[in-house]
Amino acid sequence: MADFAPVDQEMATSPVALLAAARAGNKAAEDRLLSWVYTYIRDRVSRQAGRLPDPAVASSDLTQNVVWNVWKSLDKFKGATPGEFWKYVNITTNHVVGDEYRRAHAELRDADRRKSLPDGSAFSPPAGNDSPSQEAVKKEEEQQREAALEAALGALSELQREVFRKRFQEHREYRDIAAELEITEAYARQIFSRACKDLKKMLESVRKK
């Protein structure tokens, strides 16, 4: 068995059958498979989180992020063997951990610059003294800002986009967002904060062009 397969014999031999049953609507099979995926990802992430600035926090948050990504994309899995299933999970785990590693260290490098930005500046139009006769120009600028925000949202991860829309645009409570997306409330808050920071950086870049 390849080294990405779990040690537990049942987990190593039965995931594809459980996935087929889950796709057919078997809730017990779905719950069991989710439990396996969570256990496998938790163990993988705990060994990789040491690469991040705060391993203790990162391990818990990353586990939830990877599980969410894997679970949401299992409909794309077309493999037929247990080895292919766990390889798919392993590749997704490495991809998300790698993205988090690059993001975390980029944030450390940019910390001073981000602190110098006024809170919420990326979401507000530049100050000006437009007269009423310039309403058409202001409207066009507003449309451009909205288009830029939509483009920036499209560049976020699916989970960031979901949390941001529910919190910022739908004014949902964190506990409701967490329950709907099956993540913790603390993680929902972290994802929203990170989404805001990423959006500010992208929108500031657009405004400087």
Image (cartoon, helix red, strand yellow):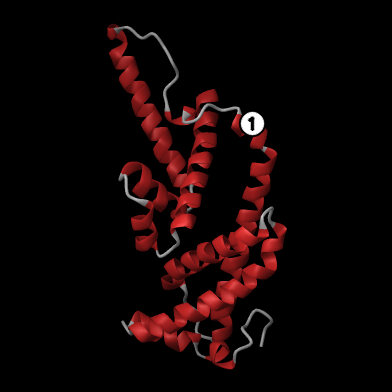
Residue 201 visible in the picture? yes
Q: Residue 65 appears at what percent x and percent y?
A: 51, 62
Q: Amino acid at mark 1?
A: Arg
- Read off the residue under disc 1: 113
Place of residue 106 in the rendered image (x, y in percent of width and height, measured from the top left): 66, 44
Q: Is residue 130 above or below residue 204?
A: above
Tell me the crowding category of disc 1: few under 14, some 14 to 19, or many 20 or more residues within 10 angstroms, Cα based: few
Name the residue located 62 percent from the left edge and 74 percent from the top edge: 43
* Side (left or right) of 147 relative to 187: left
Q: Is residue 209 visible?
A: no
Q: Position of residue 150 (x, y in %)?
A: 39, 39
- Image quadrant containing the N terminus: bottom right
Image quadrant in which the C terminus is located: top right
Task: Please tell me which residue is depicted at 41% across the width and 72% down the height of the picture.
Answer: 75
Q: Nearer the viewer, residue 148 or 54?
A: 54
Determine the residue positioned at 28% across, 8% down.
132
Q: Residue at x 67, y 83 (%)?
A: 2
Is residue 75 or residue 51 the one in the foreground?
A: 51
Q: Is residue 184 left or right of residue 58?
A: left
- Near-viewer residue (50 or 77): 50
Coordinates of residue 7 in the picture (x, y in percent): 64, 87
Q: How many marks?
A: 1
- Which quadrant of the figure has residue 5? bottom right
Q: As drawn, which residue projects farthest toward the right? A: 51
Task: Place residue 19 in its image quadrant.
Answer: bottom left
In this rendering, the answer to whether 207 lies above or below 66 is above
Instruction: Please state if 44 lies on the left or on the right of 19 as rendered.
Output: right
Q: Label 1, secondary structure: give it.
A: helix
